[in-house]
Structures are given as C-alpha cells and as structure tokens.
Image: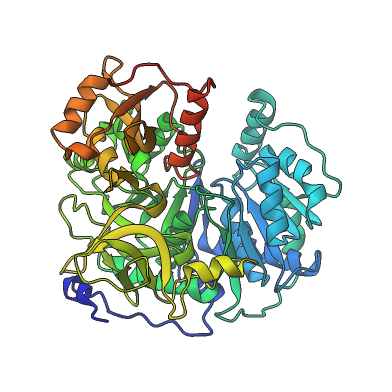
Amino acid sequence: MEKNWLKSYPPGVPAEIHVDASESLISLLESSCDRFPELPSFSNFGASITYGEFDRMSRAFGAYLQNALGLGKGDRVAVMMPNLLQQPVAVFGALRAGCTVVNTNPLYTARELQHQLADSGATAIVVLDHFAHTVQEALPHTQVRHVIVSRVGDLLHFPKAQIANFVVTHLKHMVPDWHIDGALALPDLLHEGSAMQLRHGVPAGDDMAFLQYTGGTTGIPKGAILTHRNLVANVRQTTAWVKGVLEEGKEVAIIPLPLYHVFALTAMLTYFALGANNVLITNPRDIPAFLKELKHTKFSAMIGVNTLFNALLNAPGIEQIDTTSAKLFIAGGMAVQRNVADRWQRLFGMPIVEGYGLTETSPIVCANRLDINTYTGSIGLPVPSTEVAIFDEQDNMLPIGATGEICVRGPQVMQGYWNRPEETERVLNADGWLHTGDIGCMDEQGYVRLMDRKKDVIVVSGFKVFPNEVEDVVAMHPGVLEVAAIAAVDEHSDEVVKVVVVRKDPQLSADALIEHCRKNLTPYKVPKYVVFRETPMPKSNIGKILRRVVKEEEMRAGQGGDAGYSTEQAA
C-alpha cells in the first residue's frame, strides 16, 4: 500500500524504526539507569528517587520475587496502585524478575478485581493499603498466593513518609480495615531483596510483558497480550517522533493520568528512555492540589485527556501556571474538543497536540506533528513503521477520503486477547490488520480524522450521526461544562440524538442549546432531546466520559430511577 503520510512527516523523523527481536524493556530500563544515575527518575509528593536509586529498588523487588516467592517467567504479578513512587518500582521489578505485569485499577470493586485476577491467572498482587480490603474480599476466588501491601509514604523521605502515613490512616481515615494472612510489607520486601541476587534471564522480544486489560467501556474487560517487543517498538516510535523537541536528560514530564492505563504507561516509558523526571500526580481529580503542583514545578511536557484539560481551564488560578519551560501538551484517550483546544492555546500560547491509540496497540498509532501552531481536528499521521488504512464492513480497503473503520498494522499491535481466540480472530485478520472499532477517514496528506466509535454511531432516518461531532458543537456553548451525545428512541424515527449536559451556567435552557446547535449542525444532527444532569459525568479511569453508562442511567431515569438529572428537556 502507498504510505502517503510519509510526505507529511516532520524533518528528521524516520519512516521506519528498528526493533531487535531480542530487545526487551529490561534493556531499555537498564540503559537509562546506567546513563542517568544521578538524575531524578520519578517525583511524587515533593520527593524524588534518582535513576540509580530506582535501579537498586526495582532490582531488590525483582530479586525478592525470584528468591523468596519463587516467581519468574510466566508468572503474573498484578499491580494495584495509583501514581506513587512505588508503582513503577513494582512494575519494573516484576519485569526484571521475568514476570508478566497485570496492571489493575485501584478503584475496581471486588467483583471486577476478582474477574481480572482470575482471568489473568495472577499469583501475586502489589496493592496500596487503601484498597487492601477489596483484595481481601476478592482473594478466595483467585489463584493469588502472595499479597504485597504498600503505604502511601513508603518511598518518601523521613519525616514526610511518617507524616503521610499517619495523616491518611489516622486523621483522614482513608484506609478501611483489612486482614490478609501472610501479607508482606513493601519496605520489608525491598530491604530483604537488596541482599538477594537477581538472576538475569533476559526476556525474548516475544515474551509477554503486560497483560493489559481494556477499559471495559463496552463490555467485560479483555486482556490484551503486549509483548516486550510491542512495548519497545512503541517507545522507539514515540521517541523518534519527539526527539527533535525533547532532549535527553533535560526534561520534566507531568504524568497526571494513572500509570495502570496504557497511554500513561507508554508515555512514562518514553520519558524514562529519555532520562526525564516523571512527576507523578496521585489524584488529578483534586484540581486545586494538581494546580498547586503545577505552580511549583518547572515542567517541559504534560499528558492529559480532554476532560482533564477542560477541568483545568475552568479552575480558579489556572492562569498562574508558569509554562515558560513547556514544550509539549499531549492529549490522547479521547477526542479533544475544539473549544477546549482553542481556550488552552489562547491562555498558554501553545496547542494541545492530539494523538490516537488503543490498548491493543501499546497504544500509540497516530500523532500530530509537534510543530503545529493550532488545533487541527485530526488525530495526526501514522507513527514510524505503522500502517493505517480504512476498511469497509466487508473487510475491503477503501480509497483515500472514504469513511470506514480505522485499521492498524505494525510492530506495536498486540498478539491477541488472553484466552479469547474468537475475540482475537474477530479483530485481527490473517494479514495482521487490527480492526479498531473506530470510524474515520484519511486525507491525501495522510492525516487521519477520527469520527467516533463504531458502536456509538447514531442512525437518524438512515443518516449516520457521530456523537463526537455533536459533543464538539455543544461544548462550544459557554454555558456547557460537560456533554455526552447518545441515541434515544423516538416514535417517529428509530433513533434520534439526545444530549446529556452538565451546565457551567445554571441559567442555560434546553431551547437555547438547541438553537445553538441549529446554527452549527445539519438538521438531522441537531439533538431532539436535551437533559441537564446535576452531577458530574461518569468517567473511566483516565477521565473519558462513559457514554454507555450515561445511556444506562438515562434508561433507569426513564423507568423512575434516580440518575441525578433535572427534568428540563427541549420541546
């Protein structure tokens, strides 16, 4: 196929990247630790650990897993923690022991956790004590034999560590009671592991590094098999893309998205490969605390999602952030709305650079050029060694400009879904093309435009309406804080557009919003129903609005349930 996107590549970005078949994340980790031993690798709550310290801690963790717990190649280690210094230590330590990491959302219920642990076959779990009670409840129905428990302050310095642990446990009462026989304390494990030998059985490129579960926004989460080669390839692709802007050993990157999510994971791996200081934000939903951190940090890069950038823009004091050192604001995980992008650029004089990826692609597939000076509305160009094509429903490749399903082929594409051969066959064809489930198109210059999720498309009298487009227009109204566009049933049509809105202006009416939409949308795309929601939108672990949940709550509200909505609707 013709790779028409290559003619739009920035200077210095190669068409292909080379990934040695034997290269693993271990070699990538150890290379950075060797080259930048005195530089800070991770910072959190005002404390930092250098690359040298990180090397020793992760080595000790891996040695303990091997020698004391008897874990190694083929064993799954679940890591259930928010962004704290100990999270990457546990992840890299498990990888260095030869294990496979199962990233786990700390906010899971016992039922959700039980499913993931049982499905993955995890035999060990590392958990923050805040969530140990959930592990306790799920444990009897899993294969987990070893539980390692950490406290918030475990890797902070004295006396900050003791103060943090005392405050969250005894003053804020954030740690529910739990009891797990034989649970191991992380500090004890690191101390004992430091005297043990780490056996180096270097993983092959095709060995499983992560069993990364999909978000489960459209059903039961599935474990995507991501090999060392998949992740190394995506790090190489991403570093090739940013190398002209970011410099080795000189960057400070803000990581507010959870590291158990694949977007944040690969961003962190990329920054780690560049010798950057990864500043971990434990709770980005605490916007005042997040702003305080940003005001006191001279940072050069930050990742985020549309809802996070929007929340920051609406926070008092946002204009006080010093962005004089900033080089990149990168967004992924969901479409960036034009209104958010424009407001951000007006405030800081820099655009939000949007990219695109999936759990199944480790995750980066496309990215905008870093030298853009305005919002493009595109998810960018395929990154090096990546092919993107648009397919129809009969699995035929469509011509440039046609709309269909975005499909991807490249070294970052997963090996399949764990224990789900039928699901794997459904999304991965014989030629290696991954069907993403996203609808989009590609122009003559190779730029890809994302329209929506295939399952979310609304069909109005035979015409397809993409919720992203409707949401983008509704969000342009100054009285709107958040919006979700969903399908609704109507007596005159199979489906019509309904928007559920969280207001910024409490006086905003449904009629005013409909009029705004009529000025900016073709008639069949204009919402027929507007419902105002009084509570925040349900969101995924990275802040993506969950349309499926919104729709379910709407249905319950229609049946007399309480979904937190006001009764005002458009006529």
Name the image quarter holding residue 235: bottom left
Q: Which residue is at the far front? A: 492
Q: Which residue is at the far right? A: 181
Near-viewer residue (273 or 325)? 273
Near-viewer residue (263 or 567)? 567
Q: Which residue is at the far bottom? A: 21
Residue at point 15% right, 37% down? 520
The percent coordinates of residue 348 (x first, y second) are 21, 41
Residue at point 46% right, 29% down? 554
Q: How many marks?
A: 0
The percent coordinates of residue 373 (x first, y second) are 15, 53
The percent coordinates of residue 517 (x first, y second) are 19, 32
Tell me which colouring the rendered structure shows: rainbow
The percent coordinates of residue 518 (x first, y second) are 16, 32
Near-viewer residue (482 or 305)? 482
- In the rendered view of the protein, which quadrant contains the C terminus? top left
**Residue 252 position (above or below residue 256):** below
**Residue 126 position (above or below residue 467):** below
- In the rendered view of the protein, which quadrant contains the N terminus? bottom left
Name the image quarter holding residue 491: top left
Horizontal placement of 124 versus 285: left or right? right
Horizontal placement of 392 versus 4: left or right? right
**Residue 135 position (above or below residue 63):** above
Residue at point 28% right, 21% down? 570
Q: Is residue 478 visible?
A: no
Residue at point 41% right, 32% down? 287
Name the image quarter holding residue 432: bottom left
Q: Can residue 345 be seen in this view?
A: yes
